[in-house]
Amino acid sequence: MRFFFILFIILPILEIFVFIKVGSIIGALNTVALVILGGVIGLYIIRQQGFRAALRARAQMSQGQVPAMDMIESFFMVIAGLLIMLPGFISDILGIALLIPLVRQAVLRKLLTSASWKAKSTRVYEGEFYRDASNDKGYVSATHSAKKDPQKDTLTQDNKKNENF
């Protein structure tokens, strides 16, 4: 909740303050030109990283590897491009910081070690299904259903017999 407060309330107020200060120093027209230039550079970074990520992923998958880290790196590059593309000098500084590999790796390490990204245990319910060929309208019928046993607090399976299968 605090993150969204900072993102949507505090950051725009700071961006407006910095706009006013920069505009008073270099002039309003130059400030607008810098904002437009930031948008163009951010769009270029996003396009370049999209193509580069697709090529690297294809190369790694053709070698039988999973391109997970390259995809995460490319995601951070796209986020950097979006931050640079947003109007504002603070977001530009944050985007430029994400372009630096050491900063990207530090942010990635911090995100991976935080407790909010850890996998939570879930229950998996297995079952089978079949398509009825005589009445195939795209509907799927289940051959097993799970019922909760109140005494054991576990699931039991009822096997349904299908004469058509």
Image (cartoon, rainbow, N blue to C red):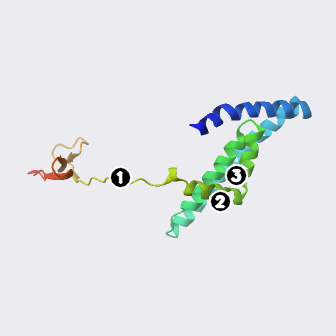
Give the side of residue 68 with respect to residue 164, left or right: right
Q: Position of residue 134 (x, y in %)?
A: 15, 46
Q: Is residue 89 left or right of residue 124?
A: right
Of the residues under marks 1 and 2, which one precedes in the sequence?
A: 2
Residue on which disc 3 sits: 98
Number of labels in the image equals 3
Find residue 122 and name its label: 1
Say which of marks 1 and 2 sits in front: 1
Residue 126 seen by the camera = yes
Q: Residue furthest bottom?
A: 63
Question: Taking the image as drawn, is residue 132 in sight?
Answer: no
* Secondary structure state at the residue bearing disc 2: helix
Q: Which quadrant: the N terminus? A: top right
Q: Label 3: few (<14), some or many (≥20) within 10 Å? A: many
Distance from disc 3 to disc 1, alpha carbons, whole Å, reads 34 Å
Numbered circle sitting on residue 105: 2
Q: For mark 1, does the 10 Å Cα neighbourhood hold few (<14), some (14 to 19), or many (20 or more) residues?
A: few
Q: Is residue 58 above or below residue 152?
A: below
For marks 2 and 3 on the same chain, the one whose residue lies earlier in the sequence: 3
Q: What kind of residue is marked 3?
A: Leu
Q: Residue at x 41, y 53 (%)?
A: 120
Q: Earlier in the sequence, mark 3 or mark 1?
A: 3
Q: Position of residue 141 (x, y in %)?
A: 20, 46
Foreground of the two, 48 or 157: 157
* Residue at image point 75% right, 34% down: 15
| Circle 1: element type | loop
Q: Position of residue 111 (x, y in %)?
A: 58, 54
Q: CA distance from mark 1 to mark 2?
A: 30 Å
